[in-house]
Image (cartoon, helix red, strand yellow):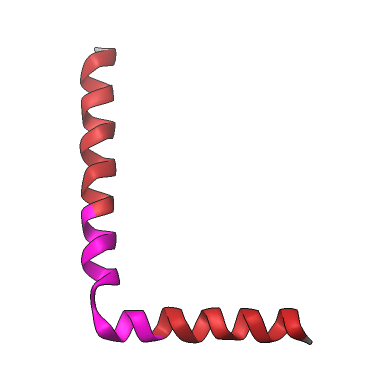
């Protein structure tokens, strides 16, 4: 039973990684990430 749970958890993690990679490859999401990163850098500089 534990082996099945491990397999299911692995499959779920793999799917999450796949979805995250797909979303991060979109230009609009890359722009949002860059803007958020710039805001963080500005707060640190202040």
- What residue is shown at x 24% (from left), y 15% (from top)? 3
* Magenta stretch: helix, strand or loop mostly: helix
Residue closer to the observer: 14 or 25? 25
- What residue is shown at x 37% (from left), y 86% (from top)? 31
Residue at the far top in the pictured view: 1
Residue at the far right in the pictured view: 46
Residue 11 sits in quarter = top left
Tell whether 33 sits left or right of 6: right
- What residue is shown at x 45% (from left), y 82% (from top)? 34
Residue closer to the observer: 1 or 39? 39
The magenta region covers 18-31
As drawn, 46 above or below 16 = below
Residue 8 sits in quarter = top left
- Which quadrant does the C terminus fall into? bottom right
- What residue is shown at x 30% (from left), y 86% (from top)? 28
Instruction: Give percent across and percent down for residue 24.
Output: 29, 70
As drawn, 3 above or below 23 = above
Instruction: Give percent across and percent down for residue 27.
Output: 26, 84
As drawn, 28 above or below 14 = below
Magenta stretch contains residue 20: yes
- Which quadrant does the N terminus fall into? top left
Instruction: Give percent across and percent down for residue 43.
Output: 71, 83
């Amino acid at each position: 039973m534990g082996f099945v749970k491990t397999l299911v958890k692995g499959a779920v993690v793999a799917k999450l990684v796949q979805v995250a990679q797909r979303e991060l490859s979109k230009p609009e999401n890359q722009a949002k990430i860059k803007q958020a990163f710039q805001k963080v850098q500005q707060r640190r500089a202040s």
